[in-house]
C-alpha cells in the first residue's frame, strides 16, 4: 500500500521545539547587543500584535448576544507569528502599490496612531511612509527569529516513522509535513533510511530543486514540505530564480560546484507564514510541491496524521474534498483530545461526526511519539 503520513508542528515538541505560541513569544525577547533599529522593529511589532489581539476579541458581534462579541472563533485568543507575518506582508504590499484590498490603508492608519515615537516623521504622511518602509524589515525580522529558534537537533519522538519506512506492507511512504524545521530529515539520515525530498544531487554548497527525483528509483520514502524549510533559499542563477537547499553556515558566501558565487535573493530562508500562504502555493517551488500532494490524494486512500492543528484553510479544503471523493479514504488521527480540533477548524468541526460514523476517521488518543506500528496495524492494513 501507499501511505500518506501527514505531520504538523505538534510532532516536533518532543525535540523541545516550541509551537506557535512559543515562537511568537520569541519575537519579543530582547537580545544582548541588538541595535536600536532592531529594538524599534520589535516595539512596532508589539503594537501590531496588540492591535490584532484586540481585533480577535471584537469580531462576531451580534444583537442576538446583546451586542457582545463571540470573538474570532477559529483564530485562538492571541496573535501568532503567522498572523503577524501576514500583517507585515500587507504593509509591504501597500508600500509597493500591490495591495489588493481597501482595508490595508485603514489598518496602517490605526497602527500609525498607536505607534507614537516608534515612527519617524513630523506629519501624518511622513509617519505613514516610515511605517510602509518598515514592512519588509518587519517580515524579515520575524523570519530570522523563527529560523534561529527552529535550529534544533532531533531528540526523540519519531520511532514510528522508522517502523513505517521499514515495513514490508508499505510499498511507499509519503511524508507530508507543514513544519519548517529539519527534524524529519535528521531522523531519516541518522537511521540510514534513504529518502527523496524534491532536490537533486549536491552542487557545491547547494542542492537545486528537482521534483523529478520523486519518480526515481529511490522513491520508497518521499518527503514533501508544503510550507518550505529553514534550509531552503532562493538564488539568482543563470538568469532565473531557483530554490535550493543550502549546506553551509553563511549564505552570502555560497558557491556552486564550479566555485561560482551564488547570489541569494534574500538573507532569509524560503518558508511560508501568514494566512495568505495559500496565494504563495501558486508560485515557484510551492506549485510543484503542492501538485505532488494533490496527486497523492488521488493515489492514496490511507492517511496517518499527527500534530496538525487544522489551521491551514487551503489544506483543509483539500482534505475535505478527499474525504468526500470516496468512502474508502480514511484518516487515522494520532491526537490527544481530538475533539479540541473542532474549536480550531470549521472544516473539521462540520465533518468530524460524519467522517467518524462513516468509518473514515479513526482517532487514537495518543501523539505519534507514544504509538508503535503494532498498535495501528488493524487500522492501517
Image (cartoon, rainbow, N blue to C red):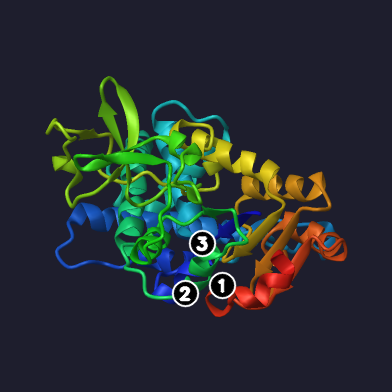
Classify mark 1: helix, strand or loop: helix
Separation (CA) of disc 1 from disc 2: 7 Å
Quadrant of the image for the N terminus? bottom right
Which SS class for mark 3? helix
The residue indicated by pointer 1 is: 368
In what quadrant of the picture does the C terminus appear? bottom right
Dot 3 crowding, Cα within 10 Å, few <14, some 14–19, many 20+: many
Residue position for label 2? 157
Q: Position of residue 241 (x, y in %)?
A: 33, 27
| Horizontal side of residue 60 vs 246, given as left or right | right
Q: Are marks 2 and 3 in contact (CB under 8 Å)?
A: no
Q: Earlier in the sequence, mark 2 or mark 3?
A: 2
- Between 378 and 149, which is closer to the camera in this rendering? 378
Q: Which mark is residue 165?
A: 3
Which is more foreground, mark 2 or mark 3? 3
Please rate how many residues cluster around mark 1, counting C-alpha atoms within 10 Å: few if below 14, some from 14 to 19, many from 20.
Answer: many
Whether tag 1 and tag 2 are in contact, CB under 8 A, the answer is: yes
The answer to whether residue 264 is visible is yes
Q: Crowdedness of circle 2 by 10 Å Cα count: few (<14), some, many (20+)?
A: some
Q: Residue sitting at 59 percent across and 53 percent down? A: 171
Residue 126 appears in which quarter of the rendering?
top left
Relative to 249, 129 lies left or right:
right
| Upstream in sequence: badge 1 or badge 2 | 2
Cα separation, mark 2 vs mark 3, equals 15 Å
User: Residue 173 bears which disc, if any?
Assistant: none
Q: Earlier in the sequence, mark 1 or mark 3?
A: 3
Looking at the image, which residue is at 75% across and 68% down? 362
Between disc 1 and disc 3, the foreground one is 3
Q: Secondary structure at mark 2?
A: loop
Amino acid at each position: 500500500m501507499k501511505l500518506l503520513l501527514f505531520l504538523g508542528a505538534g510532532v516536533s515538541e518532543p525535540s523541545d521545539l516550541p509551537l506557535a505560541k512559543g515562537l511568537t513569544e520569541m519575537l519579543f525577547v530582547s537580545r544582548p547587543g541588538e541595535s536600536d533599529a532592531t529594538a524599534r522593529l520589535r516595539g512596532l511589532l508589539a503594537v501590531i500584535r496588540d492591535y490584532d489581539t484586540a481585533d480577535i476579541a471584537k469580531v462576531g458581534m451580534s444583537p442576538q448576544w446583546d451586542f457582545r462579541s463571540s470573538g474570532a472563533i477559529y483564530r485562538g485568543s492571541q496573535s501568532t507569528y503567522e498572523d503577524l507575518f501576514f500583517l507585515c506582508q500587507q504593509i509591504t504590499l501597500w508600500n509597493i502599490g500591490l495591495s489588493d484590498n481597501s482595508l490595508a490603508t485603514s489598518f496602517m492608519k490605526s497602527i500609525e496612531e498607536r505607534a507614537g515615537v516608534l515612527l519617524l516623521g513630523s506629519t501624518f504622511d511622513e509617519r505613514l511612509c516610515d511605517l510602509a518602509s518598515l514592512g519588509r524589515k518587519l517580515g524579515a525580522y520575524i523570519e530570522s527569529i523563527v529560523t534561529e529558534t527552529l535550529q534544533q537537533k532531533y531528540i526523540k519522538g519519531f520511532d514510528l516513522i522508522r517502523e513505517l519506512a521499514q515495513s514490508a506492507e508499505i510499498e511507499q511512504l509519503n511524508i507530508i509535513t507543514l513544519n519548517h524545521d529539519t527534524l524529519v530529515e535528521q531522523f531519516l539520515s541518522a537511521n540510514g533510511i534513504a529518502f527523496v525530498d524534491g532536490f537533486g544531487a549536491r552542487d557545491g554548497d547547494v542542492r537545486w530543486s528537482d521534483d523529478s527525483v520523486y519518480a526515481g528509483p529511490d522513491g520508497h520514502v518521499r518527503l514533501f514540505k508544503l510550507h518550505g524549510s529553514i534550509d531552503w533559499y532562493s538564488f539568482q542563477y543563470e538568469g532565473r530564480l531557483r530554490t535550493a537547499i543550502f549546506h553551509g553556515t553563511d549564505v552570502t558566501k555560497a558557491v556552486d560546484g564550479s566555485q561560482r558565487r551564488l547570489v541569494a535573493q534574500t538573507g532569509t530562508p524560503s518558508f511560508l507564514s501568514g494566512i495568505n500562504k495559500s496565494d504563495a502555493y501558486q508560485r515557484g517551488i510551492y506549485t510543484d510541491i503542492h501538485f505532488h500532494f494533490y496527486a497523492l490524494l488521488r493515489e492514496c486512500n490511507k492517511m496517518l496524521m499527527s500534530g496538525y492543528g487544522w489551521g491551514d484553510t487551503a489544506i483543509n479544503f483539500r482534505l475535505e474534498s478527499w474525504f468526500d471523493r470516496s468512502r474508502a479514504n480514511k484518516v487515522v488521527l494520532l491526537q490527544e483530545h481530538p475533539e479540541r480540533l473542532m474549536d480550531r477548524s470549521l472544516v473539521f468541526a462540520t465533518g468530524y461526526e460524519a467522517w467518524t460514523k462513516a468509518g473514515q476517521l479513526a482517532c487514537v488518543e495518543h501523539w505519534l511519539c507514544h504509538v508503535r506500528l503494532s498498535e495501528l496495524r488493524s487500522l492501517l492494513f
